[in-house]
Image: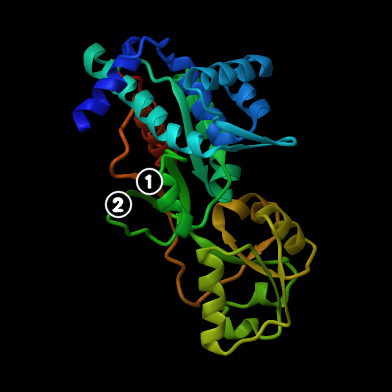
Amino acid sequence: MVLSVYRNILNIIIGKNDLGVTALELKQLMIFQTAAQELNFTRTAEILCFAQSSITAHIKSLEEELGVPLFERLGKRVILSEAGHRFKLYADRIIQLSEEAKETVGGYIEPSGILTICASETQCTYRLPSLLSQFQSLYPKVQLVFRPGIAETEMEGLLSKGHIDAVLISMIPITSESLIVDLLIPEPIVIVSHPDHFLAKKPAVSPLDLEGQPLLVTEKCDYRRLFEESMAEAGAQPSSKLELGDVEAIKKCVIAGIGIAALPKIAVESEVAQGRMAILKWVGPDFPIVTQLVWHKDKWMSPALRAFLDVTREVILNKPHSLPL
């Protein structure tokens, strides 16, 4: 059974099948794979640098060849049909096998294709610009697609299903039998206030010192949870708690003197250096947050994925990068 499946996949790759039907083209499969991930033909066209009409035509041709609709059109929305979900499993395997075959037979191949990466807000805002600049100059044939931060409970499933290729995230160290976790660097978390706040002048600030103070917090994440737990364990109650959707909004509120926040040090270094924000001398519990790269243990290490992991390590660890010989 397994040999039969892979024989059929190979036949599709090399342009043969037993039914005399025109073989599927890899380009069609790559278009379908991207459209299945994005569920938006306009976005798919932008990612692949095609006209939207070309994307639609390729999908329609593929559906006619297979004899089933792969997408359901609900007004302006597009979702995968049941057949589309089943076909995506094979499309992913065909594309992966094709890339493996090229690398195995041809030796080093210039990284190319599409990578879908999930990165936390801290990474997207403060590290990705320089990382992307270096990566794109080295590997211009790789198209990176970024998804917003996801919960740890969703991460494993998305990686195992191939919806994302890798995750760059700051949180407590991840442990999983099905994931490979590369711990890169500690991500220091600091408690910040307006420079004129009375706590900014104290030689030591404990969780109890935050009793009755207004707090500014991010959406659920590990360092927010640890910060709130440290106050709860000390019996300290904030006067109010304002949850904001992103780090930049929290920083602006701190600068305006609205409250106190726990944030990654990398996010506030510029404002602290400018004297617009102060780092409190925190003597409470540590925040064991680590920036880490994560991918599934069964994920094929394509040239593009290997290149992304290598450049990410080198940029974050501040090591020079050289192209492979």
Graded by Cα atoms within 10 Å as few (under 14), some (14 to 19) or many (20 or more), the crowding at tag 1 reads some
Asked whether 68 or 171 is in front, the reply is: 68
In the rendered view, does 275 fall on the left or right side of 71?
right
Asked whether 246 or 259 is in front, the reply is: 246
Farthest bottom residue in view: 235
Q: Is residue 138 above or below residue 190?
A: above
What x and y, as percent, mark residue 30? 48, 22
Earlier sequence position, callout 2 versus callout 1: 1
Query: Could you tell me the amino acid type at mark 1?
Result: Ser
The residue to which callout 2 is attached is 178
Q: Is residue 285 above or below residue 313?
A: below
What x and y, as percent, mark residue 227? 55, 73
Residue 276 visible somewhere in the drawing: no
**Quadrant placement of the N terminus:** top left
Residue 25 visible somewhere in the drawing: yes
**Quadrant placement of the C terminus:** top left
Query: Could you tell me the amino acid type at mark 2?
Result: Ser
What numbered label is drawn on residue 160?
1
Asked whether 32 or 165 is in front, the reply is: 32
What numbered label is drawn on residue 46?
none
Q: Quadrant of residue 89?
A: top left
Q: Residue at x 59, y 61 (%)?
A: 263
